[in-house]
Amino acid sequence: MRRALNLILINLICTALTFAQSTKKTDSISSVRIAESFFNSSIKQRSLLFNGPLFQGYAPNVEGSANFQDLMTFSNGSIVYQGFRFDGIPLIYDIYQDKIISLIDGSLKYSFQNDWISEFNLNGHHFKHIQVTDTVNSVIKPGFYDLIYDGKSRIFVKRTKIMEFLLNGKYITYYFTPKTYYYIERGGKFKVIKGKKSFLNYFKDRKPELNKHLKQNKIKFNRKPEEAMILLVSFYERLPN
């Protein structure tokens, strides 16, 4: 990673020297200043991305994909890292390890520092990094959550995978099983959504209306929980007090 940044800086200095010569400013001080100007305007902020550890991947006896949407190739996304927003960044989200992976030099995989990520967008999904101080009593754990509804209430989805194994004689094969968990945030407090009953209990004051609205739209909560929750909470927030 440092080698790549050094090459970039060397190229900028060379460009600066050429530019300086064409403008008859051949002294080294002017050239260095031009290079610094180019670096500060186009490279410096993006270089903040290149500070995570290399990503090694998984052993050959691990089958399947650990990634969000089972993607095996990088997709361009955006990320807010150390307070700066970067667009058009090649990303993969490993939901087993809860790590965001990118590329440097077009081939080296590295992972970002989770604590420095506040949010990222990937394939039409908006993920927020939720920090939790009381990890013992909190119903939600630190990590990245897919924000599927953002209003007076917010609905988050934890998309993750667990690793399981099969024993075949002397050989062990590992594979991933997806798991999905739902949370609602109301008044700054997170609560678990275990199903339709659990969800509607958070809106007891308008429960009959919500049930009716769900039936009118012919959506089965258990089959399409995310679609149902978005429909119901957006309907609830439009209801007159």
Image (cartoon, grey):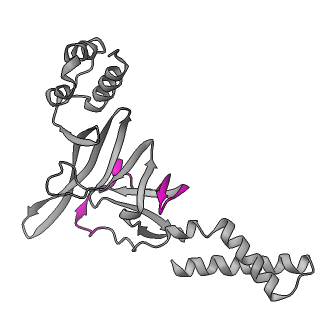
Left or right: 228, with 72 as reference point: left
Looking at the rendering, the stretch of residues picked out in magenta corresponds to 58-87
Q: Position of residue 141 (x, y in %)?
A: 22, 54
Q: Residue at x 26, y 17 (%)?
A: 214
Q: Is residue 162 above or below residue 154?
A: below
Tell me if residue 93 is in the magenta stretch: no
Tell me if residue 82 is in the magenta stretch: yes
Identify the image quadrant of the C terminus.
top left
Q: Is residue 157 above or below residue 45?
A: above
The foreground one among 107 and 80 is 80
Residue 108 is at least partly visible in this image? yes
Q: Name, please, the residue furthest toward the right.
A: 24
Q: Position of residue 232 (x, y in %)?
A: 29, 23
Q: Name, please, the residue furthest toward the bottom.
A: 28
Q: Position of residue 45 (x, y in %)?
A: 58, 66
Q: Residue at x 14, y 26 (%)?
A: 197
The foreground one among 154 and 97 is 154
Left or right: 148, with 220 as reference point: right
Q: Residue at x 53, y 68 (%)?
A: 106
Q: Is residue 67 above or below residue 55?
A: above
Q: Position of residue 55 (x, y in %)?
A: 37, 70
- How many discs appear? 0
- Quarter assignment of residue 218: top left
The foreground one among 107 and 201 is 201
